[in-house]
Image (spheres, helix red, strand yellow):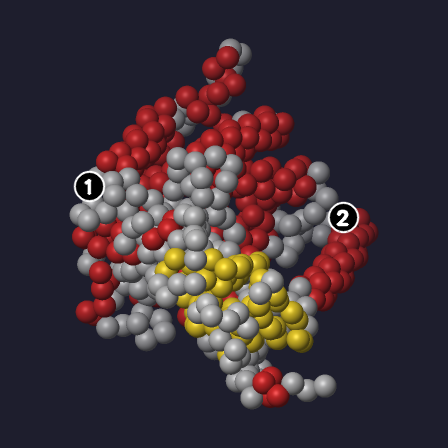
Amino acid sequence: MTISWLEDSEPLQLDEALLRVSSSVAGQPLGLYKLNDDCYRCPYQRVTSLSTQPETLTFNTKRGWRLAAKASTAELVSSVDPDSTEYCSLEAQLGDQGFYELSVNSSGCHLTTVQEPRDVYKPLWVFALVLLGLAIIHGLWSCIATRVRNRRVKDAPDLPTVDDAQKQKQKSRLASLDVFRGVTILVMIFVNQWQGQYWFFEHSTWNGLQVADLVFAWFMWIMGACIPLSLSSQIRRGKSMKKMVFHIFKRSWWLLIIGISLNSLGGYNKLEAYRLPGVLQRFAITYLVMALAMLPAMARKPKLPEEKSWTTHVYDITCMWPQWILAIAIIIGHTCIIFLLHVPNCPTGYLGPGGLYNNSTVDGSCVGGATGYIDRLVFGKSHIYQNPTPKATYGTAAFDPEGLLGVMLACISVFLGVQAGMTLYIYKDWRSRVIRWTAWGVVTGVIATGLCGGSQDGGVIPVNKNLWSLSYVMVTSCFAFFLLTAFYIIVDILKWWTGSPFFYPGRNALLMYVGHEVTFEMFPFTWQYGDMQSHFWRLGEALWTVMFWLVVSVWMHEKKYFWKL
């Protein structure tokens, strides 16, 4: 049976539901209030007045809601303090394209489903099976190709092969690092391409850790792991210190220029409001700092002492003790700034987004505390990111997640990667590497848990990608140590997997990143079909973009083209 109010309603967008509300409570004017599950300790927001005349409202369905009928006319009502005006309330898990009715009567609030929502997780299962099938086909093809190649070599032993230098280069290159980088760049493309519009693939609104929050930190960590290997390679080739310093500055300069240029994509090229911070800009600064800091350590050509003692077990740490002092000084300096710097009209040591956050105790202009204040002071309000993730939920002001103060702890993300690279450089036995990487994973994980109290919004320093908090550095590094260890064992030691196809984008990560940014709205890299108001089409388009760039990376590898600065 068709219900008339459904026919008269406007078409719903993706992740929207219709809610028809009414009240039969006589003699007591009530208002409908809402509170989103993603809004930490936020006040209830008034939606409309409840009456016997039904009203149809549209709600976003990505997160759950708490709905309440209150005898109040205030726009905001605390959800933390006791509220005598509340008549009734309930938890509402509204689904995509679902139709619901909320009726308030003498017995309380009642939510009924008029039309069942769509199954938003079905596309995930469908595409997961498709990707699994492709992976099986790729694996079988690789096995057949390897056997055919080995048989040809066996039958024709006199065929020319690559020279010894090339063999040694291939042997010394750690495939697992390229695989880790390749996985990271493909995840980055996926989340940048709207990731099927699933909330758990997006960035966290403020505190917390979701899939998109991992990518940037992992890239920085991997860059750090490559620094000792890159510097040692240049030293082996007899490159002078002067040329190496010049190369570091040159690479940082080009990363900075490319990053600033990419900020103009999408028509954001007005100089009076041009955004200055950005992803590659942060790469440029952190690489400059950490590469210059590691140059003296690598110039000494550190080598594991032949005499066995307790120091040999930690030589990958002690051989770079000046760099550790620098890293600790950066952490102490950053901590002092965020907790001691006086921010006008804001609480000292504030780490929240302001606005509705935590019962609206702090104004939205205080977003990020000292972190946001320094960016507004240095760049000005017009030259930082205008639409940060907490803006829609908490009503906060402009805030840049790639701002200046975050660079300090981003250097620590890179430095922990450097530590992984030094372990790889110093210890040649695979067991020694695995033990140390695993130990670092445990240590950084314990530190992260201690700082955030094992919760999303608790602890002394919550996990926060926007602030690039110390707990965020530790937890993402924890995952990075464990992932590199797993890839290293599977790909480089046991050789159960060649790393294909993730190896290919890992060799050309910069090209993949810049290329994807430039072609973000260009066919055939991306496309649209109809109104795209379904997770199926959104997810399909995102995975198409990922697969397209994967094919591009394989083609570039076959052409032996690698874009390096």
| Picture coordinates of residue 433, whole percent (x, y) | 57, 30
At a point 53% along the width and 72% down the height, the residue shown is 23
| Picture coordinates of residue 374, whole percent (x, y) | 22, 49
**Amino acid type shown at disc 2:** Pro
Q: Secondary structure at mark 1?
A: loop
Q: Nearer the viewer, mark 1 or mark 2?
A: 1
> Where 475 falls versus 84 (above or below)?
above
- Residue 492 shows up from this direction: no
What distance separates the C-alpha of mark 1 from that of mark 2? 74 Å
Q: Which numbered disc covers residue 342? A: 1
At a point 47% along the width and 15% down the height, the residue shown is 311
| Picture coordinates of residue 15, whole percent (x, y) | 56, 70
What residue sits right under mark 2 in the picture? Answer: 157
Q: Nearer the viewer, residue 564 or 467?
A: 467
**Amino acid type shown at disc 1:** His
Mark toward the start of the polypeptide (1 vs 2):
2
Q: Nearer the viewer, residue 190 or 348?
A: 348
Quarter of the image that includes the N terminus: bottom right
- Residue 62 shows up from this direction: yes
> Where 423 falls versus 410 (above or below)?
above
In the picture, measured across the screen, residue 367 lies left or right of residue 9, that is: left
Q: Nearer the viewer, residue 75 or 169?
A: 75
Number of numbered discs overlaid on the protein picture: 2
Q: Secondary structure at mark 2?
A: loop
Q: Which numbered disc covers residue 108? A: none
Label 2 neighbour load within 10 Å: few <14, some 14-19, many 20+: few
| Picture coordinates of residue 383, whole percent (x, y) | 24, 62
Label 1 neighbour load within 10 Å: few <14, some 14-19, many 20+: some
> Where 491 falls versus 105 (above or below)?
above
